[in-house]
Amino acid sequence: MPIHYPKHDFIDFYISTVPDKAGVYALWDETEIIFYGWTRDSIRGELYNHKHGRHGSCTRAAVYFNYQPTLFPDYKYRELIREFESEHNRPPRCHES
């Protein structure tokens, strides 16, 4: 199942509204998911890290994000990656080495 929360512009204002909870998140370019991530600590913190380049330039260039709090973020993350790879025959762009 994809993340069902709405997409937001990848700017500090919207990131500041994200809960400080465990969960999964997706980073988007204009049309497609470029990265899936998960955290047991703070979705908001991880989004700030991506926005400010602490995880590299690929995710820093995201245009939108969405997220989903969950008690089992590692499980949900694996599910999201499997679904994406099944549909696109490749991982999200910022996951590729």
Image: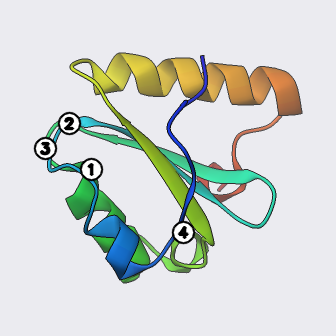
- What residue is at 20 percent from the left and 36 percent from the top? 22
Amino acid carrying label 4: it is Thr
Which residue is under mark 2? 22
Whole-percent x and y of residue 31?
A: 81, 58
Q: Quadrant of the N terminus?
A: top right
Q: Is residue 41 left or right of residue 66?
A: left
Q: Do residues under tags 1 and 3 come within 8 Å of each other at their CB atoms?
A: no
Q: Do residues under tags 4 and 2 come within 8 Å of each other at their CB atoms?
A: no
Which label lies toward us, 4 or 2? 2
Q: Is residue 10 left or right of residue 19?
A: right
Identify the secondary structure beneath mark 4.
helix
Whole-percent x and y of residue 24?
A: 38, 37
Identify the secondary structure beneath mark 2.
loop
Looking at the image, tell me whether mark 4 or mark 2 is earlier in sequence order. Answer: 2
Which residue is under mark 1? 43
Which label lies toward us, 1 or 4? 1
Looking at the image, tell me whether mark 2 or mark 1 is earlier in sequence order. Answer: 2
Identify the secondary structure beneath mark 3.
loop
Amino acid carrying label 3: it is Asp
The Cα–Cα distance between marks 1 and 4, rounded to whole angstroms, is 15 Å
Which residue is under mark 4? 59
- Quadrant in the rendering for residue 97: bottom right
Whole-percent x and y of residue 62?
A: 60, 71
